[in-house]
Image: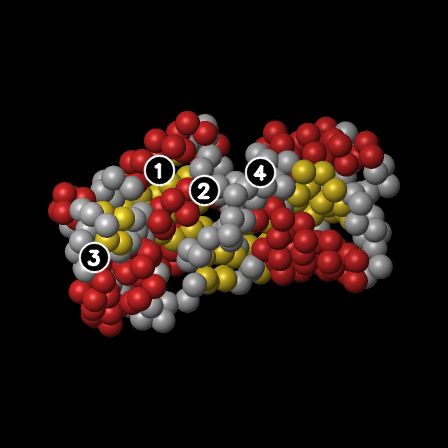
């Protein structure tokens, strides 16, 4: 930028000279307290050496703490309220905030227009940080929030190329464990109801299932995709049974979809597990109470929420050497469907 014939330094230049990220430089300049002393000193020296002068009105607004964080769910409200996964994540976030004095704001995106207004809300000083859940595709929201200087932690690996911390379950190896268990049970044709193609969680669980079957010399073409909903699981099970009538086992990428698959199998008079074995993923409250009780891969859902919250609060405090990502272990829970 040029003003009166001289170059005006930018925030990106301040960050480069200080050897910190743009978001860290922004937090220092905007007077936020959750930055390490070393980073604060480096940015201060860069500001002085470059002669950087931020917009004072923007700075005064940014210095106001709201003592609240946002939980952003990129799903329709009916999906959020109908899937027990989100309730358990929320429970974990609430537990992680205990004693912090911070309030929680829940935001749900209904459509693309909502995404734009939500980004504007989050970057306008209404919250001190954000936890983002259920990203689809290369959603620009995380990059927009990071660029604004807002501390952000994601639930799940992002598909977009953006440097932002995230917490996830070991979806790849969990799915592989489920597939291996079905192989060990002597099942011959093992299909899968995979999650959405535009979500890392769907991709990773499908990849783990596919790798395990490939290494065992088994076919990997019995695949149907669904949207993590009950109805999606039902439709995908119908699709698999029509295309692969010899199917004798199915790994389903969520418990809710697995419940839908069990409805279809029962309606067709197919015995579980005698004719078709079923393994889900989540170990939600639905798994133990389904008929028959669902064998599933347990992921620590509430711990996802707690760990995301810990990571965000640690970022607020300027803790050094925080991990860029945290991967939580999964465990196969054996019940009656397999």
Residue 228, label in figure: 4
Mark 3, residue position: 52
Q: Distance between the residues labelled 4 and 2?
A: 22 Å
Q: Do the residues labelled 2 and 1 touch (CB within 8 Å)?
A: yes
Q: Which of marks 4 and 2 is nearer the N terminus?
A: 2
Residue 119, label in figure: 1
Q: Do the residues labelled 4 and 1 touch (CB within 8 Å)?
A: no
Residue shown at 50%/62% (left/top)? 327
Q: Is mark 4 on a helix, strand or loop?
A: loop
Q: How far across and down, in percent of the image, does residue 54 sit?
A: 19, 51
Residue 140, label in figure: 2
Q: Distance between the residues labelled 2 and 1?
A: 9 Å
**48 left or right, relative to 189:** left
Q: In which quarter of the image is residue 237?
A: top right
Q: How far across and down, in percent of the image, does residue 187 sit?
A: 81, 52
Q: How far apart are marks 2 and 3 (CA)?
A: 28 Å
Q: Nearer the viewer, mark 4 or mark 1?
A: 1
Residue shown at 22%/42% (left/top)? 125
Q: Quadrant of residue 58?
A: top left
Please rate how many residues cluster around mark 2, counting C-alpha atoms within 10 Å: few if below 14, some from 14 to 19, many from 20: some
Q: Which of marks 4 and 1 is nearer the N terminus?
A: 1
Residue shown at 80%/45% (left/top)? 221
- Vertical placement of residue 138 versus 186, above or below: above
**236 left or right, relative to 324:** right
Can residue 135 be spotted in the picture? yes
């Amino acid at each position: 930028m040029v003003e009166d014939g001289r170059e005006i330094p930018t925030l990106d230049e301040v960050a480069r000279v200080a050897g910190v990220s743009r978001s860290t430089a922004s937090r220092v300049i905007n007077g936020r307290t959750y930055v390490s002393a070393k980073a604060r000193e480096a940015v201060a020296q860069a500001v002085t050496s470059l002669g950087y002068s931020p917009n004072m009105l923007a700075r005064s607004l940014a210095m106001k703490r709201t003592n609240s964080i946002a939980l952003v769910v990129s799903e329709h409200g009916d999906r959020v309220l109908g899937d027990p996964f989100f309730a358990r994540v929320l429970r974990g976030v609430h537990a992680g905030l205990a004693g912090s004095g911070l309030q929680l704001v829940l935001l749900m995106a209904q459509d693309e227009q909502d995404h734009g207004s939500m980004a504007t809300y989050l970057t306008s000083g209404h919250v001190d940080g954000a936890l983002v859940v259920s990203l689809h595709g290369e959603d620009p929201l995380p990059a927009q929030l990071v660029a604004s200087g807002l501390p952000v932690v994601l639930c799940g690996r992002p598909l977009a190329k953006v440097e932002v911390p995230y917490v996830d379950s070991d979806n790849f190896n969990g799915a592989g464990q489920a597939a291996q268990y079905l192989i060990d049970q002597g099942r011959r044709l093992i299909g899968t109801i995979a999650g959405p193609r535009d979500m890392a969680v769907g991709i990773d669980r499908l990849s783990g299932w596919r790798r395990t079957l490939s290494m065992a010399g088994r076919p990997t073409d019995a695949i149907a995709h669904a949207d993590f909903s009950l109805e999606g699981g039902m439709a995908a099970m119908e699709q698999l049974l029509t295309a692969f009538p010899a199917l004798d086992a199915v790994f389903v990428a969520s418990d809710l979809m697995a419940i839908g698959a069990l409805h279809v199998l029962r309606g067709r008079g197919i015995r579980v597990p005698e004719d078709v074995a079923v393994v889900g993923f989540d170990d939600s409250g639905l798994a133990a109470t389904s008929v028959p009780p669902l064998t599933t891969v347990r992921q620590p859902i509430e711990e996802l929420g707690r760990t995301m919250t810990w990571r965000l609060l640690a970022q607020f405090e300027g803790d050094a050497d925080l991990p860029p990502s945290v991967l939580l272990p999964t465990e196969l829970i054996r019940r009656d469907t397999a």
